[in-house]
Image (cartoon, helix red, strand yellow):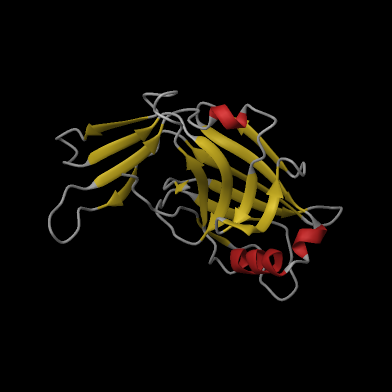
Amino acid sequence: MLFAATGGDLELRRRAGGGFKLRGRFPYGKTATLSDGGRNGGRPRKERFAPKAFEYNVSRDDVNIHFLSGHRYDKPLASRKARTLELNDTDDALEFDATITPEIEQTTWGRDFLSAFAAGLVTGLSPGFRLPPQRTVPNAETVEDEDPSDGNAIIRTINAALLFELSAVTQPAYDEAQIEARNWKVSGVPTGATSRVDHLRRWRL
């Protein structure tokens, strides 16, 4: 499983009937710096996702996609099979609505996620995915040199990927990606927390 490194927005609200509604987006076309080249002077590495890169699995209702805490399948927060995760794929971003039910709110990982989110510690959104076999999608990814006027990085563009999960994570990478929480309360933690959102970093070779 591979984890992306690009930005998104999250908004968490208390539902009138109990639990929480989490709304977020994973933007396409944004470029993330995965490596600055290191101390030995290697070339920087960057990554971006083409519009609708996740379309294949998102468009298939028979594929169960999860919303997890920290890429942990033993810490599920919502899923499409459970009808608590809705996805909308646009040219600009993959948008989603996740319902964190009262039952999940009462689990240890549910409470941990909500408390860490309120404290500004869980600030990232990261999709877990695999690239399709090259024999079926030859151009699932492309690699090119950065425009010399911008730098000397190697840029990888993900054109098609098989999405299996979206995760709330702790590692920030994009300053412009924001998390916003409004009108919600969890016993013992602050309300109205606002912090940056971003992603786990991993360069795929």
- Point 53% across, 67% down: residue: 121
Quadrant occupied by the C terminus: top left
Tell me if 23 is positioned left or right of 4 in this view. Answer: right
Labels in figure, total: 0
Task: Determine whether 64 is above or below 201 in the image.
Answer: above
Task: Determine whether 195 is above or below 150 in the image.
Answer: below
Picture coordinates of residue 201, whole percent (x, y) = 39, 53
Picture coordinates of residue 100, whole percent (x, y) = 74, 54
Q: Nearer the viewer, residue 152 or 129?
A: 129
Picture coordinates of residue 134, whole percent (x, y) = 39, 28
| Furthest residue toward front | 135
Tell me if 154 is positioned left or right of 95 in this view. Answer: left
Task: Determine whether 173 is above or below 155 in the image.
Answer: below
- Point 69% across, 30% down: residue: 61
| Furthest residue toward bottom | 188
Tell me if 190 is positioned left or right of 121 in this view. Answer: right
Picture coordinates of residue 95, whole percent (x, y) = 60, 37
| Furthest residue toward right | 17
- Point 54% across, 38% down: residue: 163
Tell me if 131 is positioned left or right of 9 in this view. Answer: left
- Point 41% across, 48% down: residue: 5
